[in-house]
């Protein structure tokens, strides 16, 4: 019986459950490790993202025989130059538009309340259940929008604190660019020839997955943001730059990001001129069509190969467990885990086939 597959599966499940229970009972033992991991997580992730963004530039400069340290210095100067351009030409306009938007929110609330009330008073066949729902929305609209504005302000303040907390990112980025290609050889020197080959293959797969996601998602977000900005400027939508920047950041979230990005633009268009709502929808559809048919296939391709239903499930779960950061990192984390599991699965199949041949 012990050789039966169902019995071995049952024993493996019991052992896994016991291991989980044991780890839960001695969680205090791992507390220092998780504290250390939490302390370096933000600069490590931030440095890693900038590393994948700047690595193509590093390789480009090295192809022209520029020493690595000088190439890294050039990359840092480029980051400083981009930051200077943003703070001088983009941030002031966005800040002014955002301030105007916040100041106009009470007027928008009043207009929305008046619109709903007028529509309600001129409808004679509204079901009682629907009528009570409208009444409840009108009564709580002020508090809802105030809560929403407070959430937005709170998120922005947290992001500002988040930015100031990441002072270690340049140091992580420097050493990643300087010694990043030495990590795999350093690890493989302690492994056997077969395991070293397997580890190199796994590292390449994970690196390709992260590179495809980070560069692809960044490129897609920037292209969509620019397309929306051009469209919003053409139709003279108020707060165009702020709305386009919001859409650019929301597009970092796979699949659901574009839907979240269009909501503020539709609300602003409705208060400015209801006809603009149609134009905003058209601009969003055109931008998404260009992104879906031309940008994403050429930039990301099928590197991740994740089903849309899986993406939705992951985003819902990660959003509930980890909030906004979970929405951003759920897909790349899943893609990396998928690459690791796929690698070991194919390694197991290869060993099994080799054993069957013998």
Image (cartoon, rainbow, N blue to C red):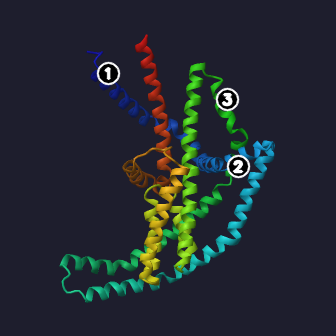
Q: Depth-wise, is mark 2 or mark 1 nearer the camera?
A: 2
- The residue that mark 1 highlights is 8
Q: Quadrant of residue 211?
A: top right
> What percent of the width, then of the height, locates residue 92?
66, 74
Percent x, y for residue 81?
74, 61
Quick check: can you spot residue 180? yes
- In the picture, measured across the screen, residue 60 lies left or right of residue 163, that is right
- Total of numbered circles in the picture? 3
Q: In the rendered view, tell whether residue 355 sits above or below residue 323.
A: above
Mark 3 or 2: in front is: 2
Quick one: SS at disc 2? helix
- At numbered mark 1, what does the secondary structure look like: helix, strand or loop? helix
**Gap in angstroms between the C-alphas marked 2 and 1:** 51 Å
Q: Relative to residue 66, is residue 349 drawn left or right?
A: left
Indicate whether 14 appears above or below 158. Answer: above
Q: Which residue is mark 3?
A: 186
Q: Is 316 placed left or right of 120 in the picture?
A: right
Find residue 156 and report its horizontal and vertical position in percent: 55, 67
- Crowd class of label 3 (few under 14; some 14 to 19; many from 20; radius 10 Å): few
Q: Is residue 328 above or below residue 275?
A: above
Mark-to-mark CA distance, 3 and 1 = 37 Å
Instruction: Name which of mark 3 and mark 1 comes first in the sequence.
Output: 1
Q: Residue at x 38, y 33 (%)?
A: 21
Q: Earlier in the sequence, mark 2 or mark 1?
A: 1
Residue that mark 2 sits on: 57
Residue depicted at 43% across the width and 24% down the height: 349
* SS under mark 3: helix
Residue drawn 58% across the image and 66% down it = 226
Q: Give the farthest residue toward the front.
A: 294
- Neighbor class of circle 1 (other Cα within 10 Å; few <14, some 14-19, many 20+) is few
């Amino acid at each position: 019986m012990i050789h039966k597959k169902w019995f071995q599966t049952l024993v493996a499940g019991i052992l896994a459950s016991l291991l989980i229970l044991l780890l839960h009972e001695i969680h205090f033992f791992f507390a220092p490790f998780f504290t250390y991991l939490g302390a370096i997580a933000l600069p490590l992730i931030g440095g890693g993202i900038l590393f994948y963004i700047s690595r193509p530039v590093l390789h480009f400069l090295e192809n022209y025989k520029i020493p690595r340290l000088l190439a890294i210095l050039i990359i840092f100067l480029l980051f400083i130059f981009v930051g200077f351009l943003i703070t001088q030409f983009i941030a002031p306009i966005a800040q002014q538009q955002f301030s105007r938007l916040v100041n106009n929110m009470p007027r928008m609330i009043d207009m929305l309340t008046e619109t709903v009330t007028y529509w309600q008073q001129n409808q004679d066949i509204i079901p009682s259940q629907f009528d009570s729902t409208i009444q409840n929305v009108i009564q709580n609209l002020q508090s809802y929008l105030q809560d929403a504005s407070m959430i937005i302000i709170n998120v922005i303040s947290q992001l500002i604190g988040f930015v100031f907390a990441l002072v270690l990112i340049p140091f992580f980025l420097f050493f990643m660019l300087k010694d990043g290609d030495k990590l795999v050889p350093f690890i493989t020197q302690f492994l056997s020839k077969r395991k070293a080959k397997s580890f190199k293959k796994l590292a390449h797969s994970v690196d390709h997955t992260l590179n495809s996601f980070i560069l692809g998602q960044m490129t897609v977000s920037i292209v969509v943001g620019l397309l929306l900005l051009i469209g919003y400027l053409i139709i003279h939508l108020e707060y165009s730059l702020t709305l386009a920047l919001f859409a650019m950041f929301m597009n970092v979230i796979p699949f659901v990001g574009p839907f979240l990005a269009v909501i503020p633009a539709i609300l602003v268009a409705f208060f400015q001129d209801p006809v603009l709502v149609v134009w905003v929808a058209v601009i969003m559809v055109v931008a998404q069509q260009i992104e879906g048919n031309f940008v994403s296939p050429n930039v990301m391709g099928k590197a991740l190969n994740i089903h849309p239903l899986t993406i939705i499930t992951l985003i819902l779960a990660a959003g509930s467990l980890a909030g906004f950061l979970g929405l951003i990192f759920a897909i790349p984390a899943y893609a990396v885990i998928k690459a690791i599991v796929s690698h070991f699965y194919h390694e197991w199949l290869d060993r099994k086939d080799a054993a069957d041949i013998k």
